[in-house]
Amino acid sequence: MALFHFTVTQTKRSKGQSAIASAAYRSGEKLYSEYYGEYSDYTRKGGVICSDIFLPPHALKEYADRQTLWNAVEKAERGKNAQLAYSFEISLQNEFSLEENIALAREFLFREFVSRGMTVDVSFHEKECEDGGTPNPHFHFLCPIRPMEQDGTWGIKQRREYVLDEEGNRIRDANGKYVFNAVPTTDWGSPETLEHWREAWAEMCNAKFAEKGLDVRIDHRSYERQGVELLPTVHEGATVRAMEKKGIRTEKGEFNRWIRATNAVIRDIKKKIALLFDWIAEAKAELAKPQAPDLVSLLSAYYTQRRAGAYSQKGKVSNLKEMNETFNYLRANGIYSLEDLESRVSEHSAATESLKKTLDEQTARMKAIKQLYDSSAAFQSLKPVYDGLQKIKFEKPRAKYKAEHEAELKQFYAARRKLTREFPDGKVDMKKLSDEYDELEQAHETTYGEFKAVRDDLHRLWKVKSCVDTAARFNERTEEQMLQNRPQTRHKKEELSR
């Protein structure tokens, strides 16, 4: 299934990360860090298909060697909290062959990154799937944040832009230091550039889909930005998809099944509402013509026609019963004209929007709670790793420990941040979250029931619409026959008068 996944983060020393370790992990190699004086060995890591380094024309040729490149980056960055590299992860498409995916990714990297003077260290991955699992091809690439000058030396990442007064003099702060703004020397880290890259990747994939004659497309925008009134599912991941493929039901799978069922109801409702509004507009224009029958007359004509065509007494009774139910329904809901019918559909449209907003809020919170479950589990399992770091007082062994446990510490810090945002006082109460989730599930059942009630009523209105259409077509045929017979009658009268 075509999908869009495009993320970017920064590799930072402030998070205990190393450019050498990151490059070694993504490429599945063993690299030596001159900054830390140690090796990062990921030669046993599976799933790496191939890797490469793409250099701009003015880069030093020795940077084609991964270890040389990233040691040069580490050396250029002296700060203990330095930002080292941009780290990208992008999904490839299962509809393309491996060769097509790699060729498309290479074209994208040269066109959008190398052409900007960026150095790209790319690795293509495809994790091995268990029987029945869905392939998950993707590629990672690292780009140094510091730009490279035309002579091959590393440039500056940002420059100072001093704040001036009305007379053009620099302004000092309370400590006597000049006030300035840090202005990036490139646009690589701007939201606009990231948006451009995401859109460019989607366009290249869609062009490839069209070239292969595939009726699928991806979009870099969220559902909300696309104007798609659907609830987003949660990312399942390769492990969950493999379990679901084997018939093992998972929490994420259940949640996504619930989302898809709700989306199916929403799509059905919105389609019916749109069609009913179009039909009402056409019917109102038709009924506005001189001597046109009204809604009740058309329905009466429809059932009269059905009774006339019924061969058995049982059929006639059934028609009478259905007519009685239809008129009782219309009377009970105050629907006597097309204006009343239009008002009823408008009420359903407004109710659908309100219910959709409620579901958006419910599902967003439920997804957040599920993520907090994962964060709590990660926090508990990785806390011993973090505690081990706290016990190390000297800088060199501490840096070595950070490099060895980079991935675990990164996950721990991320989990801790999420839990702190939810529980600022530091008291993590998972039972409270579990109770809230149960309440949200019950609330969803109620909201989902209201959606189904709207859909059922729209089906009744659709039945009325079908009856009116049939009666209108019958009236048109009757009028056409009358018009065809009129000239013949006049001709016969003329013959008699002679």
Image (cartoon, rainbow, N blue to C red):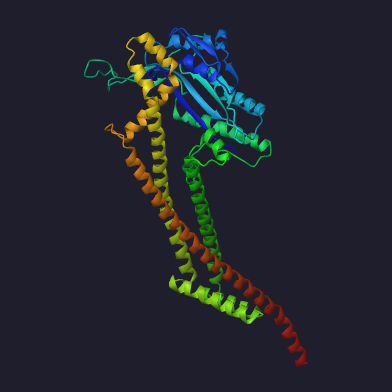
**Along the viewing direction, whichever of 165 and 214 lies nearer the viewer:** 214
Q: Is residue 231 above or below residue 388?
A: below
State the image coordinates of residue 345 (x, y, percent, origin top left). Answer: 47, 62
Q: Which quarter of the rendering shows the N terminus?
A: top right
Residue at position x 45%, y 22% in the image = 407
Percent of width and height locating residue 257: 51, 46
The spot of residue 287 in percent (x, y) is: 54, 71
Which of 461 and 55 lies nearest the eye of the viewer?
A: 461
Q: Is residue 260 visible?
A: yes
Quadrant of the image for the C terminus? bottom right
Residue at 36% across / 18% down in the picture?
Answer: 388
Q: Residue at x 49, y 59 (%)?
A: 455
Quadrant for residue 109, please give it: top right
Q: Is residue 341 above or below residue 171?
A: below
The answer to whether 167 appears left or right of 311 in the picture is left
Question: Residue 133: horizontal and vertical position, in percent?
Answer: 59, 35
The quarter of the picture where residue 115 lies is top right
